[in-house]
Amino acid sequence: MAFSSRFLVLVAGVVASVNAYVGPGVVTGDTAVHDPTMCKDSSGTYFVFSTAPGIAIRTSTDRTAFSYLGEVFPDGATWTDEYTLTSNGNLWAPECHYDGSQFWLYYAASSFGSQNSAIFLATSSTGQPGDWTNKGLVTSTASGDSYNAIDPNLIIDGSTWFLSLGSWWTGIKGTTVSSSTGLGAGSITNLATRTEASGAIEASSIYKYGNYYYLFTSWDVCCQGTSSTYNIRVGRADSVSGTYYDADGVSLLEGGGTLVLETHDAIYGPGGQDIFEDGDGPLLIYHYYTSDGSFLGINLLDFSTGWPVVA
């Protein structure tokens, strides 16, 4: 009986370790964000852009202590009002790329549950509030389309600029844009579809590690405080346009997706993720909820097994 008890304790410990998640890395200051994206400029300053009226900007010199800097568009973005259906509404899920001299910022305008949606691009040489030029519309959708043009994410694959996007409906799509202007969306490629939960998949982010492209998505429901059920999934492919498969060999076009991070301990609904490569490796940038609100999560990703593990 003593042997059996020790064996059960050992098994329970193994199961607990398999299901355990590393908590968000330590960050301080103003970290109350939704749908964060991270860039680092040539001086080494980290910029975090996130969903807000005008798009919120936070900065850090050490990737730990963050301060609120202001908004990309402090005077509003009137060209988005027809999509947000209000004046100076929330601009969603920005995506940042810094090329060594200029910030490229994709962002979405819509309203909850609507396909009246658009993705725009803005650029800046400084990243400072108000010092941005709106470059125009990238792509849009309307009611009755098969997908929803929000949640943009850019990956630069050699000379190809590839933008993934999409939320619910028929899932995640991909398209090329001009490498010189960042505009001019091309034909649409299907990347991932959720076959259950009413198609609850969004917030795509593609990252290349080694010979594989990894497509991260958020499943289930965002933005419900501690009732949020967001969780982060992944699949990988040999090319940026897919086909992506999960660790069990299920195509992401058929509902596949390997779990990366989910609600654990007092961390609820992690998602809205971006992948940023820094000097110490690839980082998972995301938001999560506690009873106090929504906050910035930063964790290293370990790809040593061929699949990303939160470290």
Image (cartoon, helix red, strand yellow):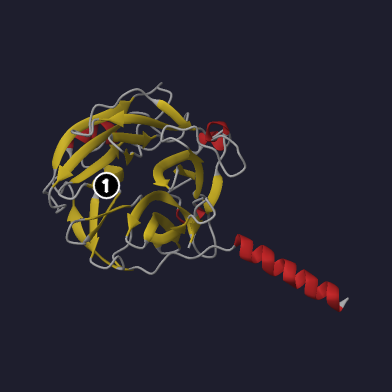
Farthest right residue in view: 1
Position of 194 relative to 227 (above/below):
above
Position of 78 relative to 73 (above/below):
above
Left or right: 95, with 102 as reference point: right
Q: Which residue is mark 1?
A: 96
Looking at the image, which residue is at 78% across and 69% down?
8
Q: Quadrant of the N terminus?
A: bottom right
Looking at the image, which residue is at 33% across and 52% down?
36
- Residue 117: x and y in percent read 32, 31
Farthest front residue in view: 211
- Residue 310: x and y in percent read 49, 59
Query: Which amino acid type is shown beneath numbered disc 1?
Result: Cys
Residue 76 seen from this side: no
- Residue 234: x and y in percent read 50, 45
Secondary-structure class at tag 1: strand
Q: Nearer the viewer, residue 11 or 306?
A: 306
- Residue 205: x and y in percent read 39, 43
Q: Nearer the viewer, residue 261 or 30?
A: 261
The answer to which quarter of the image holds residue 165 is top left
Q: Nearer the viewer, residue 296 or 163?
A: 163
